[in-house]
Image (cartoon, grey):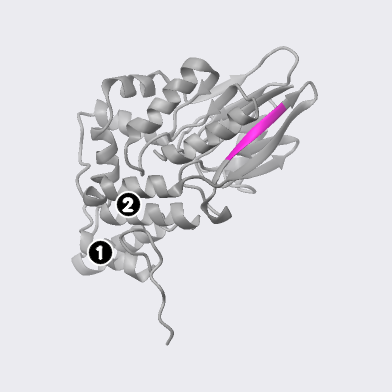
Amino acid sequence: MADFAVFSDIHGNHSALQAAIDFAMGRGITNFILLGDYVTDCPNPQKTLEKIYVLRQYFNTYIIRGNREEYLLNYKNSGAGNWRKGSASGSLLYTYENLTGKDFDFFESLPNYGIYQIKGFPGFEYCHGSPTNTSELMFREKRNTKKVLSHLKTGMLLHGHNHVQETYIYRGKKGVNPGSIGIPWYHDGKTQFCIVHGSSKGWEEEYIQLEYNRKEILREFKESDLCKIAPAWAAVTMHTIRTGVDLNQTVLLRAMRLCEQERGSVKWPNIPEKYWAIALKENHIDLYGKDIPVEEE
């Protein structure tokens, strides 16, 4: 038997990552597959990267790049463009400014796709979005998902990006999404990952949803500059961590709409904070990511 712990979409939540690592270690697992989006959205990205560097040093670890690592690399390589303080791009800027040359070299070294083949076991493939595009969303039943699965070289693809923990089988080919470690959807916000158990017959996925020390990461939000640089984005991220309900896109699109209605046009990331504040309030979220009680009529 060969067991792999599969982690995706950590987004800087080192508290959740530590819980997942501890769980895997408790199971005696020494093989890890990391599917990208290691940083952005949560404070203190260096804490997450240090844990990844330790995994890489002491364990059998396969690591690929996510779309967030690509954003950061592209931003650096283009001479740092238009990210600025504010809820639209402030979280990206905060992360960028907290990374070191070592971190960027690490991102640069990562492939976008990998294939695991070893004697005695069937092979499998792994990526962030899809094998050809880190930003491709592979939801079940969608045409692009069927196309990707039908073109696999092996019988299984491990992929992340959309934060939905699930298996989808199409014509005998299996797509496995371990869910998100750091910004988990559903399951009341428990951190999510999977363990794949391998034998000569194939690979079976075991999905894990785990409670972790959310108070630690939420406290770091409040103590960090992230809440000052990107207040509404930090609030909606904290709300997802608290509840497992993702409203990031809902709030973003509403803020853009409000800006467009009042100003006649909108261009990301130039979305004034007052529109974010209204969008948060309409979705009943306060600046600490807590639900604002809805008053009865």
What percent of the width, then of the height, locates residue 40? 35, 39
Asked which quadrant contains residue 154, the reply is top right
Between label 1 and label 2, give the one nearer the viewer: 2
Residue located 28% across and 29% down the image: 99
Q: Is residue 197 something one can see in this rendering?
A: yes
What percent of the width, then of the height, locates residue 130? 53, 34
Residue named by callout 1: 275
Residue located 45% across and 38% down the image: 10
As drawn, which residue projects farthest toward the bottom? 297
Estimate the spatial distance between the alpha carbons at disc 1 and disc 2, rounded to whole Å.
15 Å
Q: Quadrant of the N terminus?
A: top right
Stretch in magenta? 193-197
Q: Secondary structure at mark 2?
A: helix
Q: Nearer the viewer, residue 110 or 226?
A: 226
Residue named by callout 2: 234
- Magenta stretch secondary structure, dominant: strand
Q: Nearer the viewer, residue 171 or 169?
A: 169
Specify the amino acid type for callout 1: Tyr
What percent of the width, then of the height, locates residue 94? 25, 40
The answer to if 21 sits in the magenta stretch is: no
The answer to if 195 sits in the magenta stretch is: yes
Asked which quadrant contains residue 158, the reply is top right
Specify the amino acid type for callout 2: Ala
